[in-house]
Amino acid sequence: MFPRILTPVLFMAILGACYSWRPESTSPDPSLGPTDSPIYVTLIDGRSVELALPTIADDTLRARDRRALRNGRAVPVTVPVSEIRGIDPAIRLTLTDGRSVELALPTIADDTLRAWDRRALRNGRAVPVTVPVSEIRAIEARRFSAGKTIALVLGVPVGLAAAATVAILMAIGDTCWYFCN
């Protein structure tokens, strides 16, 4: 029973440590627009899909299969927003009034950032968000954090070894091995 619970908990902890929010430029890059950089879409059934050239219209994500594009083919992919659990990469904006919002698929045109509310996408809804660039105080992006991941990967075994050592010493009880006179 214990390993069945421990394995998913440790796995989720490791996944959470792999990424952290890191500050980007304090002013958005005006050239930010549709790109062939990959996005990673996690579907409700747990599958992950690597896509390029994404757009959302009529509650449907339309994109190209990234692997097919690398092989010179443009294979269209359509995914209903209701089937999406997450989209990465994402950005987090801090607005001048202090509010914070997580967004997916951002573009900038005419001094306005346009994107999709990431939390709404996880709930199966496509909610567009528009923010004037002048209202943005900070931009952060989710990036892989090697240091946190290494610390977690090394920290879990060390912690388990320490707990096992304490358990063994408690089981031995008052037995004195090294410093008894």
Image (cartoon, rainbow, N blue to C red):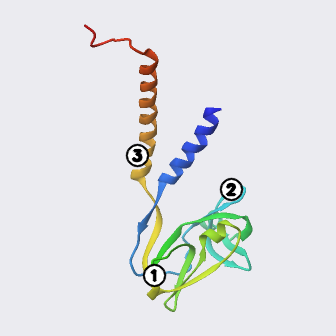
Characterize the local packing of mark 2: few (<14), some (14-19) or many (20 or more) Cα atoms within 10 angstroms: few
Q: In terms of depth relative to the viewer, which is nearer, 70 or 1? A: 1
Q: Residue at x 39, y 13 (%)?
A: 174
Secondary structure state at the residue bearing disc 1? loop
Query: As rendered, which of 95 and 48 lies closer to the eye?
Result: 95
User: Label for residue 47?
Assistant: 2
Q: What is the distance, in whole Å, between disc 1 and disc 3 at their CAs?
A: 35 Å
How far is disc 3 from disc 2 in space, using C-alphas?
A: 28 Å
Residue 43 image point, x, y percent: 69, 60
Residue at x 45%, y 42% (from the top left corner): 153
Label 3: which residue? Answer: 151
Instruction: Find residue 121 and report its horizontal and vertical position in percent.
Output: 66, 70
Q: Is residue 30 visible?
A: no
Image mark for residue 97: 1
Position of the C terminus, as image quadrant, is: top left
Q: Earlier in the sequence, mark 3 or mark 2?
A: 2
Mark closer to the observer (1, 3)? 1
